[in-house]
Amino acid sequence: MRYHRWFTPWVLVIPALAWLLVFNLWPSINTVILSFTNARPIGGGTFVGLKNFETLLHDEQLRWALLNSVIYMVVCLPFLTVLPLLLAVLVEKQLPGITFFRTAFYTPVVASAVVVALIWQWILDDRGLVNGLAEKLGIISGPLPFLSDQWLLLLSAISLTIWKGLGYYMIIYLAALGNVGRDLHEAAAVDGAGPLRRFVHITIPGVRGTMILISILISVSALRVFSELFILSGGKGGPGGRDNSVVMLIQQYSQGFEGNLGYASALSIVLFFVTVVPMLVLARLNRRGAEA
Amino acid sequence: MSVATSEPPKLDVRADSGTAPSRRRRRGSFGFNTISPREKVVRYVLLVFVLLITIGPFLWQLSTSLKGSGEDIYTRIPRLLPSQPTLDHYKAVTDTIPVWDYAKNSLVVAELVVGGNVIGSSLAGFALSRLQFRGRRIVLGLFLATLVLPGEVTIISQYVTVREFGLANTLFGVALPGMIGALNVLLMYNAFRALPIEVDQAAIVDGANAWQRFVYIGLPSVRGTISVVAIFAFIGAWDDFLWPLIVLTDPDKYTLTVGLQYLSGTFSNNPRLIAAGTMIAFIPIVIVFATLQRFFFKGVEEGAVKG
């Protein structure tokens, strides 16, 4: 039996539902429609068939962007799955001052990607902190071109992403560690298992589900990277535009007289498949792993 | 940054009074939790090491922003403490770009996004979890389905939609699409669901209508999750870069992140100036987070962030 008028729930749900339809559902459909047009940022556009998708096939910048995305994902995955877990174990124990450390470790997450990228740009500058220190210590003779070499720039952006992500995944692991049975650890300790063995045989299996979830989050966000590469490359996408990400290409085509929203939409569809496929694969692995 | 570093003892006391007692009770068996002095030292050494890595770059930027124009910032022997500390560059930034207007713009967007999300997602979350109605599961499924979709995929057609509304190049256009997030609706849905149904039934017996149950029973018991939603919405809006970059074309209307990028593109030869600009964007968000981190970490423990 219901204790409210039939329309009450709808009145409450309508605003959120309207937002969902107008700003999520309709844009997803419209992206597909737009990808068959040559719409411009100012407006207008006509149907051009599969032209955008043909252009995609020959787009050299897109090929670099996809390669960069794969490298991004492959490098970020191991670091961001393991390091935050170690951090979470480190901040899990209630020591005096631990809240300060937790908050401090989370600070890079709270800061805008633009802010931290500008900070790193200065640190990695030819005359910045890293090159200065390395030269002082005699590790290198001349400055390393962190921001102007194609591969070093990509690597710099990747390390920035890893540095900024540490705290975020640490917090997720921290929540998961709370659910790992305390008594298991105690029993193992009584049986003479050291901290390392307990970590491998109790902690890791205990947070396995979270680990899979986190690896999905990492892969998807690595493929969606934008601000770090954009700022570090000064908005130019590196030498010859070879350090673009897919999202950077989408942004480039979204503006100016050269802008082409139709092509940007076709790129968005590429991005959709690139991000959703690994997500499904990892989710599937998870299910199979759970059955075994 | 000065906030986070000067406040640790205070933060600590607050957190201890908030979370530690329950934890201690839970773990207090067999003295298993007592840490040997050696382990304690090792832990603190590691903690300080990680602290240097995470906070160091911010301190370096702060120091650069305070170094006098006559000081050699490129020196081979890096100095963290400025020898001629000055606030000149902060003044210079405000002369170069309208940085306070940008901050105000960011604040307007953030307020709209926080307000929209707190109101819209708690209303919808309440209806979806506490009221029976036909179509409930379908609506819930729709919200879940959108989580799979990365926002960047639809950003172009979202821009087209905002442009059709005549809101391109406006702050309202920047705020609008993010004003009710699907994830926040689901977070609120989860939070309301944790309430025992008997409370509702008792209220119904007492003659409370749906609105009264929402205001007097629902809302007070989900304050933790509401603050997590508000914190995330604020940080997300304040830090967002790609979307305002696409929507805004007029330099007068830039938000802080877009304005900073503009600053660094135009004055990339003066690291002190850019450093001062980044600190102006960074310090407010740190203050917000440092003052609210209690709620944030409590929300995490309640499971609001588990995804």
Image (tube, helix red, strand yellow):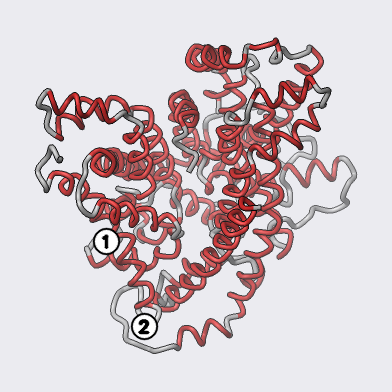
The answer to whether residue B252 is visible is no
Which residue in the structure is indicated by mark 2? A37
**Residue A163 quadrant:** top right
Q: Do the residues bearing badges 2 and 1 touch, measured as CB atoms within 8 Å? A: no
Which residue in the structure is indicated by mark 1? A22
Considering the image in quadrants, where does the N terminus of chain B appear?
Answer: top right
Give the residue drawn at x 76%, y 23%: B45
Label 2 amino acid? Thr
The answer to whether residue A271 is visible is yes
Kindly indicate whether the residues beneath marks 2 and 1 are on one polypeptide chain: yes
Q: Nearer the viewer, mark 2 or mark 1?
A: 1
Mark 2 / mark 1, whichever is N-terminal: 1
Q: Secondary structure at mark 1?
A: helix
* x and y, in percent, of residue A36 in the image: 38, 83
Q: Secondary structure at mark 2?
A: loop
Q: Is residue B286 above or below residue B95?
A: above
Give the residue drawn at x 50%, y 53%: B261
Give the residue drawn at x 74%, y 29%: B49
* x and y, in percent, of residue A248 in the image: 52, 65
Count of all numbered marks drawn on residues in the image: 2
Label 1 amino acid? Val
Q: Is residue B243 left or right of residue A188?
A: left
